[in-house]
Image: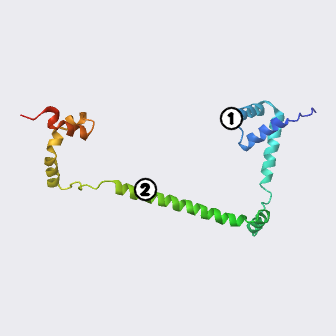
Amino acid sequence: MAERRKLSEEEMADLVAYLDGEADPETARAVEAKLSLDPTVRAEAEALRRTYDLLDYLPRPQPSTDFTNKTLDRISALRPGARANAGRRGLFGLAWAAAVLVAALAGFGGARLATPVGKPIPTEPAELDQQLVHDLRIIENKRLYDVADDLDFVRALAEPDLFGEDS
């Protein structure tokens, strides 16, 4: 009987990654090609699959009920004041949250104060018609106002010194 060759460490790592579903697509294709061509690789893959299946029968260890307390006590022993620093970090985060809230409220309030309060927009048809009649001259001449850069330019055009008096 011929002796089977052993897989290299790289081949074994690729095979394990393939069986775990962690191999990249290129490596997976290479391993699949080896599986279809090489009986040694097929045998090793089957042995690994059986080993993985046996792991399901092992009992699963459960952490003790005081695992968390023991771990925190060890951390506290290694880093004195670790729990105190956690409290300070919480206060620091709370201070940041309060500062963001104050900034948001100040921005909202400042925007409300800076926004001019004009007449409310009419909602009744009669009020709307009256507002349109009031602004009719502006509406009719809108195409002329679109050419003007700003309102000061339009007001300067109305000055009698610029073109003289209307006759």
The vertical placement of 131 against 94, above or below, is above
Between residue 26 and residue 129, name the one nearer to us.
129
Between residue 94 and residue 31, name the one nearer to us.
94
Q: Amino acid at mark 1?
A: Pro
Q: Residue at x 18, y 56 (%)?
A: 124
Quadrant where the image shows the C terminus: top left
The vertical placement of 90 against 27, above or below, is below
Residue located beneath label 1 in the image: 25
Residue located beneath label 2 in the image: 107
> Looking at the image, can residue 79 be seen?
yes
Quadrant where the image shows the N terminus: top right
Comes first in the chain, label 2 or label 1: 1
Q: Secondary structure at mark 2?
A: helix
In the image, residue 82 lies at what x, y percent?
72, 64
Q: Quadrant of residue 6?
A: top right
In the image, residue 83 lies at what x, y percent?
70, 66
Q: How would you rate the neighbour count of disc 2 (Cα within 10 Å): few for under 14, some for 14-19, many for 20 or more?
A: few
Q: Amino acid at mark 2?
A: Gly
In the image, residue 14 lies at what x, y percent?
77, 37
Q: How many marks?
A: 2
Report the side of 94 relative to 136 (left or right). right
Q: Residue at x 16, y 38 (%)?
A: 159
Q: Secondary structure at mark 1?
A: helix
> Looking at the image, can residue 63 be seen?
no
Q: How was the colour assigned to the protein in this rendering?
A: rainbow
Question: Disc 2 or disc 1, which is closer to the eye?
Answer: 2
Q: Residue at x 84, y 37 (%)?
A: 9
| Residue furthest to the left | 167
Q: How would you rate the neighbour count of disc 1 (Cα within 10 Å): few for under 14, some for 14-19, many for 20 or more?
A: few
